[in-house]
Amino acid sequence: MPLNLQQNGSSGARSIVLVVLLIVSLVLMTAYAREGVTGPIHSVQSAFMGGSSTVGSAGAGIGTATESAAESLSDLTANQSTLSGLRQQNQELRELLSNAEEYRQEVERLQALLDMKQVSGVTGPVAHIIGRSANAWDQSITIDLGSEDGVESGMTIMGATGVIGQVSQTSAHSATVRLLTDPNSGAAVMIQSTRDNGIVRGSINGILYLEDLDEDVIPEVGDVIITSGLGGSYERGLIVGAVVSVNKTANNPAGTIVVSPNDSAALLEEVIVVFNAPDVAAAEAAAAKAEAEAAAARSQEQSEDEWYDEEGGDEE
């Protein structure tokens, strides 16, 4: 019996709730039908509909963001799978650019050497520098051509702008070149403009000094110094450098004259081994002979003109 009483009580409570809800619904429907659009029930309805719309828009935005994130994750996964290949391609491109730049610079250097050969008239192969001495007492370089390539001790070595040294020792496929700046180096030279002879000597600090000039010879800054060929140490007529400092005066005949080397051996990578140089002495003799013949011809023409003038004057 107690169980039946509880069940009857629950059923009665539910019935009462349903009746109350039904009455409330009828009241609200009647009020909703009678009030205007600005009534409280309509306002609550509008607020509920707006909130529902906002929630819907937010849900759509979240969905779009989720899709974008999924696509980005997919792209990231694809990039990670090809990252190794891209890195390899990038490295290959860097190497190609580096090689292209090396080739460009080498072409420029070789072109400069070719221009020097054409201007100076020398013949001989181009050698690569494969070693340098770091000792100030032994300023030298090593080239990759030797006795089996026709290189002999005493041959002149030139850079892109002139003489830099002389072969001092050879092996089968390499040779040592003593630089002009070496303390034990010396070259018979002349001042190109005045033809005065002297000796260029190196020093431990790598500076070239012009010495053994006559006491009355005072060169000027900018004078070009060329090899004279005296003593047979260097080919004749090749540029050595230019005078950059003159401290020699009439009162100080043993002063100091500094010559700037035409090339810095520290920056060179290729050099010219001079096998043959133009016979400058023969060329100068031929030029002198041609000048003498021209002067004689001018003198003869002048004499003939004077003779004709005199003959014409006598006839009148």
Image (cartoon, grey):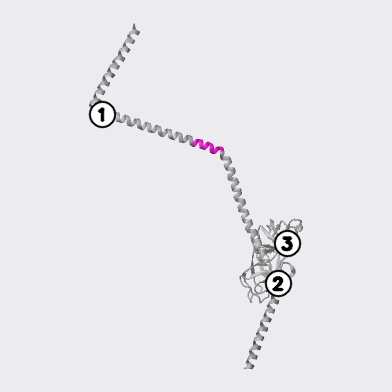
Q: In this view, does 275 lie above or below 1?
A: below
Residue 96 appears in the rendering: yes
In percent of width and height, residue 312 lies at 63, 91
The mark closer to the camera, 2 or 3, is 2
Pointers 2 and 3 in contact (CB under 8 A)? no
Nearest the eye: 258 or 304: 304
Crowdedness near tag 3: few (<14), some (14–19) or many (≥20) residues, C-alpha within 10 Å: many
> Residue 136 is drawn in which quadrant?
bottom right
Q: What residue type is labelled 1?
A: Pro
Residue 40: which numbered mark, if any? 1
> Residue 205 is drawn in which quadrant?
bottom right
Q: Does the magenta stretch include residue 118?
A: no
Q: What residue type is labelled 2?
A: Ala
Q: What residue type is labelled 3?
A: Val
Residue at numbered disc 3: 167
Q: Which of marks 1 and 2 is nearer the N terminus?
A: 1
Q: Residue sitting at 56 percent across and 37 percent down?
A: 81
Crowdedness near tag 1: few (<14), some (14–19) or many (≥20) residues, C-alpha within 10 Å: few
